[in-house]
C-alpha cells in the first residue's frame, strides 16, 4: 500500500442517502395523504422558483431503475425515508396497504441486489392532518409517531435491520416552527422548543417498539451536528459560539445520552418547558445502537448586540471555499465532531448518514457531467473519517448525500447534491464523475488521497 492510500475496515458500510419527499413525486397517488411539504410547496412564495415535490425525481415510478443504478455503482447500502402519509394517510388509524407494498418491494429489490436498506422513519413529511391538530408542538403526536413506527417496523422488520427514527430533529423543530423556512412555516420559538421535545420523545418511545417488532434491529437517530467556533477571541464571541453549540448540538446530544437539557439553553429560552412530564427524560435517553451524523460544514459565530430583544448570535463568516449553499467546505469539522462524540459522549457506534455538497453541474457536449469539486469535497471528508477511525472513533458507515439531484427543500431544484445528475425535464439519470470515483473507492475499500 503506497503512502496516501487509506484502507477502510473490511466491514465498513458504503452507501448513499435520499429522502422520500425529495425524490418520490407521486404526491397524491395510490391513496397517499397530503404532507406538510405538499401544503408548504403548494403555497405561493415558499419555495424558490415555485418548485414543488409533485414529481421530483419520479422515483415512485422509476425505483426499479434507480436500484439497478445503485447496483451498478457498487453501493453496499441505501438510506431512504418512508413517507408517513403514504402509510397512514390520516396520520394514524387506517393503513394504506399500497403504500406499504411500495416500500416492501423496494426493500426486496435492494436485498436481491445485495444492498443493505437503512430506513429513516421521519424525514420531514408529516401528514398535514396531524399538523392541522397542532403538529410536533402538541404532545399527542408522540403516540401517532409510535403507531406509525409500529406499523412500518411490523411490515418491514423481517428484512430491514437498520432503522433511523428521525432525521435532524433540530431542523424539523427550529427551521420548521421558529425560522419558518421549512414546513409548516411557523415563526414561534415556543412552538419550536415544544416540537423539539416531542420529536425526541417520539424517538425514545419508538425505539422499544421497533426492537419488539424486529429483535435483530440496529436502531439510531440522525442529528445534524456542526462545530461552532467564535469569530474572534472576544468574550462576547466566545459566549455566542457556546450558545450556538448548545442550540445546534447539545440540545439534542445531551438529553439523548441521559444528561438532560443543557442548563444554559433552558435559561436562555426563558421557557418554563412545562411540556416535560415525569419520565420523559428517561424515555428520551433509551440506549441506541448507533448515532447518525449529518455533516456539511461548521459555523463561525459572532455575538449580535443589535438589541435586547434580538440578541441571538449570528453565523457571520464562512471562509473562502464555499459551496452553492454558501456553506464553507471544512472537512476538519467532521473530524472534530467525531472525536467529540466518542471522547465526550462515549457514543458506541456512528454512521455518517449524510455528507455532500451542492455545486453547479453541467452536462457537457458529450453527455458527461464532470464534478471535480464534489469529488474533492467527498474525498477530503472521507480522509477525516479515516483519521477518526485511526484514533479509535467507531465510525461504521458513510452515506453520501445524495444519490440523485433532488428537491432541495426551500431551494427547490436549484441546488444539485447528487452524485448522479438528473435532467428534470426527461428524468434521465447521468452518473457524474463523483459517482464513478465513489464506485472505485467502494470497490477497493480504499481512498487514494494523492490522486
Ligand atoms: C440535510 C437534509 C437533507 C438535505 C441536505 C442537503 O439537512 O437532511 O434532506 O437537504 O441537508
Image (cartoon, rainbow, N blue to C red):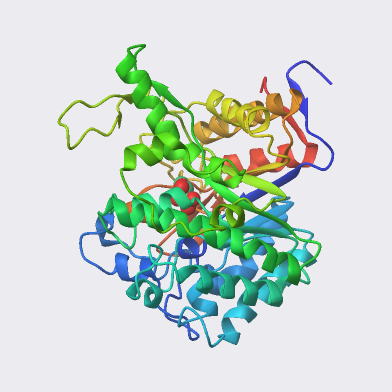
Report how many numbered discs are placed on residues in the image: 0
Q: Position of residue 241 (x, y in %)?
A: 38, 26
Q: Is residue 318 visible?
A: yes
Residue sitting at x 49%, y 26%: 330
| Furthest residue toward left | 307
Q: Position of residue 123 (x, y in %)?
A: 50, 60
Q: Kindly indicate the quadrant of the structure image that contains residue 343.
A: top right
Instruction: Please give left or right for residue 243 compared with residue 82 in the image.
Output: left
| Furthest residue toward top | 233
- Residue 336's place in the image compared with 162, above or below, is above
| Furthest residue toward front | 278
Residue nearer the viewer, 114 or 248: 248
Residue sitting at x 23%, y 27%: 304
- Residue 31's place in the image compared with 192, above or below, is below
Instruction: Please give left or right for residue 338 compared with residue 179 in the image.
Output: right
Q: Kindly indicate the quadrant of the structure image that contains residue 448.
A: top right
Q: Position of residue 2 (x, y in %)?
A: 80, 18
- Residue 139's place in the image compared with 403, above or below, is below
Q: Is residue 413 visible?
A: no
Residue nearer the viewer, 166 or 410: 166
Residue sitting at x 53%, y 70%: 145
**Quadrant where the C terminus is found in the figure:** top right
Residue nearer the viewer, 42 or 122: 122
Q: Position of residue 237 (x, y in %)?
A: 33, 19
**Quadrant where the N terminus is found in the figure:** top right
Q: Kindly indicate the quadrant of the structure image that contains residue 395.
A: top right
Amino acid at each position: 500500500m503506497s503512502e496516501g492510500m487509506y484502507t477502510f475496515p473490511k466491514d465498513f458500510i458504503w452507501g448513499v442517502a435520499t429522502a422520500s419527499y425529495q425524490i418520490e413525486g407521486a404526491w397524491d397517488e395510490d391513496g397517499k395523504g397530503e404532507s406538510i411539504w405538499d401544503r408548504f410547496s403548494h403555497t405561493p412564495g415558499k419555495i424558490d422558483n415555485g418548485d414543488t415535490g409533485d414529481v421530483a425525481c419520479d422515483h415512485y415510478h422509476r425505483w426499479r431503475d434507480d436500484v439497478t443504478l445503485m447496483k451498478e455503482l457498487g453501493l453496499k447500502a441505501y438510506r431512504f425515508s418512508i413517507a408517513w402519509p403514504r402509510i397512514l394517510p390520516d396520520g394514524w388509524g387506517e393503513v394504506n396497504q399500497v403504500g406499504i407494498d411500495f416500500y416492501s418491494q423496494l426493500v426486496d429489490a435492494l436485498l436481491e441486489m445485495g444492498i443493505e436498506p437503512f430506513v429513516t422513519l421521519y424525514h420531514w413529511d408529516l401528514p398535514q392532518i396531524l399538523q392541522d391538530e397542532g403538529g410536533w408542538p402538541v404532545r399527542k403526536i408522540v403516540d401517532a409517531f409510535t403507531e406509525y413506527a409500529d406499523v412500518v417496523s411490523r411490515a418491514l422488520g423481517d428484512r430491514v435491520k437498520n432503522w433511523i427514527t428521525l432525521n435532524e430533529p433540530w431542523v424539523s423543530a427550529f427551521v420548521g416552527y421558529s425560522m419558518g423556512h421549512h414546513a409548516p412555516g411557523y415563526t414561534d420559538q415556543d412552538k419550536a422548543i415544544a416540537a423539539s421535545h416531542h420529536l425526541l420523545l417520539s424517538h425514545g418511545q419508538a425505539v422499544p417498539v421497533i426492537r419488539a417488532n424486529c429483535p435483530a434491529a440496529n436502531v439510531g437517530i440522525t442529528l445534524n451536528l456542526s462545530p461552532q467556533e467564535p469569530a474572534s477571541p472576544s468574550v462576547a464571541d466566545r459566549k455566542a459560539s457556546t450558545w450556538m453549540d448548545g442550540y445546534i448540538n447539545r440540545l439534542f446530544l445531551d438529553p439523548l445520552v441521559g444528561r438532560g437539557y443543557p442548563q444554559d439553553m433552558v435559561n436562555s429560552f426563558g421557557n418554563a418547558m412545562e411540556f416535560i412530564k415525569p419520565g420523559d427524560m428517561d424515555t428520551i435517553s433509551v440506549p441506541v445502537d448507533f448515532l447518525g451524523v449529518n455533516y456539511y460544514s461548521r459555523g463561525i459565530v459572532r455575538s449580535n448586540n443589535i438589541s435586547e430583544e434580538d440578541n441571538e448570535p449570528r453565523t457571520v463568516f464562512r471562509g473562502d471555499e464555499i459551496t452553492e449553499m454558501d456553506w464553507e467546505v471544512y472537512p476538519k469539522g467532521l473530524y472534530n465532531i467525531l472525536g467529540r462524540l466518542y471522547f465526550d459522549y462515549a457514543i458506541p457506534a456512528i454512521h455518517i448518514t449524510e455528507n455532500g455538497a451542492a455545486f453547479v453541474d453541467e452536462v457537457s457536449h458529450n453527455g458527461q457531467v464532470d464534478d471535480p469539486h464534489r469529488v474533492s469535497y467527498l474525498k477530503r471528508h472521507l480522509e477525516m473519517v479515516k483519521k477518526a477511525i485511526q484514533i479509535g472513533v467507531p465510525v461504521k458507515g458513510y452515506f453520501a448525500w445524495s444519490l440523485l439531484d433532488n428537491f432541495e427543500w426551500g431551494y427547490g431544484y436549484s441546488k444539485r447534491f447528487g452524485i448522479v445528475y438528473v435532467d428534470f425535464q426527461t428524468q434521465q439519470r447521468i452518473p457524474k464523475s463523483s459517482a464513478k470515483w465513489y464506485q472505485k473507492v467502494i470497490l477497493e475499500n480504499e481512498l487514494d488521497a494523492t490522486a
